[in-house]
Image (cartoon, rainbow, N blue to C red):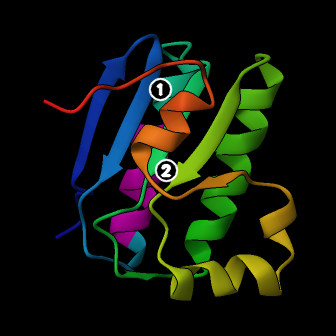
Amino acid sequence: MGRADLVVQDIGGVTVVELNDATILNAPVIENLAHSLYELVDSRGRRNIVLDFSNVKTISSSLLSVLVTLERKVRAIKGRMVISGLREELLKPFKITQLDKMFVFYKDQSAALGSFGVRVTEQ
């Protein structure tokens, strides 16, 4: 149970990462998630990233440090990372740690992609 369930796709030049684990709490899952996310930037040079949390119901505070590191890696290559679909109750740890000022949040994936100039049409 150490694998993170991710769907990674390219939409209009933006890398969209859908986190499909309802709960991201245990260390092996978070380590695997960190490895997968860092690889997108370090090995694949992905600059523009949307992290879609729509399917996530519970997160561990240790996930926050992974997101901070990812944000720094993306900025180092002159890219931009945004978070979409984060439930209101999951925003609390970001606010408590004042990380809500570091990250940009969008209601859904479509709005997040729009911030990169990508228009998504519903099919």
Q: Is residue 29 magenta?
A: yes
Q: Is residue 102 magenta?
A: no
Which structural element holds mark 2?
A: helix
**Residue placed under numbered mark 2 in the picture:** 34
Q: Specify the quadrant that holds the N terminus.
A: bottom left
Residue 68 sits in which quadrant?
A: bottom right
First in residue order: circle 1 vs circle 2: 2
In the picture, measured across the screen, residue 12 lies left or right of residue 41, that is left
Residue type marked 1:
Leu
Q: Specify the quadrant that holds the C terminus.
A: top left
In the picture, measured across the screen, residue 34 lies left or right of residue 76, that is left
**Residue placed under numbered mark 1 in the picture:** 40
In the picture, measured across the screen, residue 109 lies left or right of residue 76, that is left
- Residue placed most toward the observer, 73 or 10: 10
Q: Which residues are magenta?
A: 28-37
Q: Position of residue 71 (x, y in %)?
A: 72, 42
Residue visible at 29% across and 32% down in the picture: 8
Q: Position of residue 66 (x, y in %)?
A: 61, 57
Q: Residues within 10 Å of mark 2 (few under 14, many from 20)?
A: some
Residue visible at 32% across and 47% down in the picture: 18
User: Do we see residue 13 in this rendering?
Assistant: yes
Q: Position of residue 31 (x, y in %)?
A: 44, 59
